Image (spheres, helix red, strand yellow):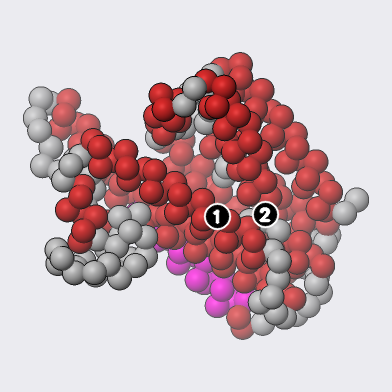
Amino acid sequence: MNPLVTVVVVAAIACVAVWVASLLTHDHSWVDRIWSIVPVAYLWIFAGAAGLADLRLDIMAALVTLWGARLTFNFARKGGYSGVEDYRWAVLRERMPRWQFELFNLFFITLYQNLLLVLITLPALTAWEHRGSPLTPLDAILAVVFVALLAGETVADQQQWRFQTRKKATIASGQTPEARFVQTGLWRYSRHPNFFFEQAQWWAVFLFGAIAAGSLLQWTVLGAALLTVLFIGSTSFTESITLSRYPEYAMYRETTSPIIPWPPRRRGEPAEA
């Protein structure tokens, strides 16, 4: 069977499973719980279809497995697998009539996001179609870049985790935290450094496929591009909620790059990224 057909079948099963689960539990974060898992499965489906004999596909699958393991760990320690729903869905439910939110749940949360999880892995289809093409120095460089981006995201998430842990402990002791959101470390140079590293890793996955094909003109760029668009929208929505909770976030926005890490600017200076 063509590996793309297998991936589509698995994705269809995942759509039905998370949609039914959301209806039964009224919890709309089921896609989040498979976000770090199904892309790993899709990559290994493509690598397996090549008999685990194409080194580029094997490297792609191994790197995405590392991505998935890191993201799964970070999601789990925040309680993501313990019934903790994404706080943004509760905000949306308050803003929408129930029928509108249920349509949003079906078409965006369930169908679109699962489609996106397929699309971001399809550079592996390009690599599979060009299996046997020799590895190049660019593949080695790209693998190193991917690992560096993975390390950057790990550091950013760890800094956020430590900040939130200290903040909760301070509040629990009856004291007022000095800061209500993280602004140090990598977060001094970007309001969302974890988002930057996450997106960049999937652009690297696209480049593996492009190297295999010998051209950047590949339709599978759609996955990385749509993921970037999703993050832009998600970032805007998330920041609107944060700003409503913490008015001082406006000053942070004025001095700190939204996504791409960049030296902080003084108030009144134009944004660089």
Residue, disc 1: 227
Inspect the image, locate mark 2, and give the three-letter code of the amino acid beneath it.
Leu
For the point 13% across and 37% down, the residue is: 177
* Contact check, label 1 and label 2, Cβ < 8 Å: yes
Residue, disc 2: 119
Crowd band around label 1 with a 10 angstrom C-alpha radius: few (<14), some (14–19), many (20+) = many
Please provide percent x and percent y for residue 158: 34, 49
Magenta highlight on residue 145: yes
Residue furthest toward the bottom?
A: 137
Question: Which quadrant is home to the C terminus?
Answer: bottom left
Inspect the image, locate mark 1, and give the three-letter code of the amino acid beneath it.
Leu
Please provide percent x and percent y for residue 201: 52, 62
Residue 271 falls in image quadrant: bottom left
Q: Is residue 270 left or right of residue 1?
A: left
Q: Is residue 188 visible?
A: no
Disc 1 on helix, strand or loop?
helix
Q: Main secondary structure of the magenta part?
A: helix
Q: Is residue 192 left or right of residue 59?
A: left
Please tell me which of labels 1 and 2 falls first in the chain. 2
Please provide percent x and percent y for residue 8: 78, 45
For the point 72% across and 75% down, the residue is: 212
Q: Which residues are magenta?
A: 139-156
